[in-house]
Image (tube, helix red, strand yellow):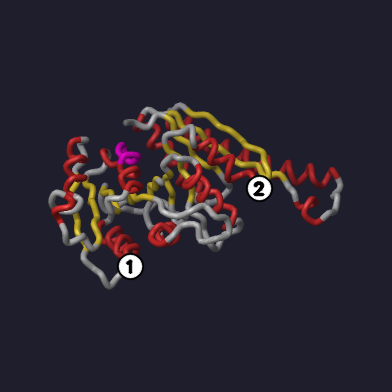
Amino acid sequence: MAYKDLLVHLDDSDICAARVEAAVALAKREGARVTGIALALESTISTYIGIDFPASLTEAQQEIVQQAAQSAVDKFSAAAQAAGVDFDTRIITCSATKAASRLAFFARHADLIFVGQPNPDAKGYAFKEALLEAVLHKSGRPVYVMPYIGRYSAKTRRAVIAWDGSKKAVRSVNDAMPLLQARDNVDVLVVNPKKRDEEFGGQQGHNLVQHLLRHGVNASVVEQIQPELSIDTVILNHLSDSGADLLVMGAFGHSRLREKAFGGVTHSILHQMIVPVLMSE
């Protein structure tokens, strides 16, 4: 497969530029079209507190929101034009309660969507986490999450696949194939492999390596036997030690607003990630 239709969420955060850079670079390499989508949130505060604000105040507030969205779109357009890629833009005006589902809807019509990791110390953290939750659990598409710390200065063009043989892990590998093919090396990371090798037809992860090799991916199995550590800690440590610039893994959890939507490893990785992560559910 090849990526031919990419989507990138635009906002006014400092890290948005790195997200745009990554999306545009991939679009150029793949010959894909990239669409930048910004959300202009309508104010509903008067409805919640039961007070009608003057129309002029509401209009002024909405104008500021629209200008911020247009500014994000303009920056994206400039980057896409400079790279010479085919692109489109869209500003979605909606309430904050509908924004996550609207973004997930548009993500369903793209091969891959770029979003940012929410910064827990930044304004609007809960809202941005809801956006991430929605595209992961409601779009049916792979999601490329950019860390809020920015683009990681990787030592090598290396990807890591967090491999447990699950259906979601399989889906993530298939969805990430163009990205894996562009890496010099790919580690199929198996944490605390099962002892019954016969159920895997040999070494756990070996069958996946053979599959990847047929797709032109230079992959190898890396075993980490560290039962005293949590799986997410082992994954993060390996990312750091290997100098990898991408993590590919399945997304586990259930979409429940205001709850810990991402269970276990998924939740930890999304909150401690140091490199971009491609996740599929």
Give the structural element (helix, strand or loop) at label 2: helix
Please tell me in which quadrant of the rendered image residue 229 appears: bottom left
Q: Which mark is residue 230?
A: 1
Identity of the amino acid at label 2? Ala
Magenta residues span: 174-178
**Who comes first in sequence, dot 1 or dot 2?**
2
Prevailing secondary structure of the magenta residues: helix
Q: Residue at x 37, y 27 (%)?
A: 31
Q: Mark 1 vs mark 2: give the one in front.
A: 1
Based on the picture, tell me whether residue 177 belongs to the magenta stretch. Answer: yes
Residue 65, position as x, y percentages in the image: 68, 44
Number of other residues with Cα within 10 Å of mark 2, as a class: few under 14, some 14 to 19, many 20 or more:
some
Q: Is residue 153 left or right of residue 8?
A: left
Please tell me in which quadrant of the rendered image residue 90 appears: top right
Q: Residue at x 73, y 47 (%)?
A: 43
Based on the picture, tell me whether residue 12 belongs to the magenta stretch. Answer: no
Identity of the amino acid at label 1? Ser
Q: Is residue 148 visible?
A: yes
Q: Is residue 227 left or right of residue 6?
A: left
- Residue closest to the eye, 66 or 181: 181
Q: Is residue 133 left or right of residue 213?
A: right
Write down the residue under mark 2.
96
Residue 48, position as x, y percentages in the image: 77, 54
Quarter of the picture holding the N terminus: top left
Residue 160, compared with residue 180, is above or below; it is below
Q: Is residue 17 visible?
A: no
Report the Cα–Cα distance between label 1 and label 2. 36 Å
Residue 235, position as x, y percentages in the image: 31, 60
- Residue closest to the eye, 30 or 230: 230
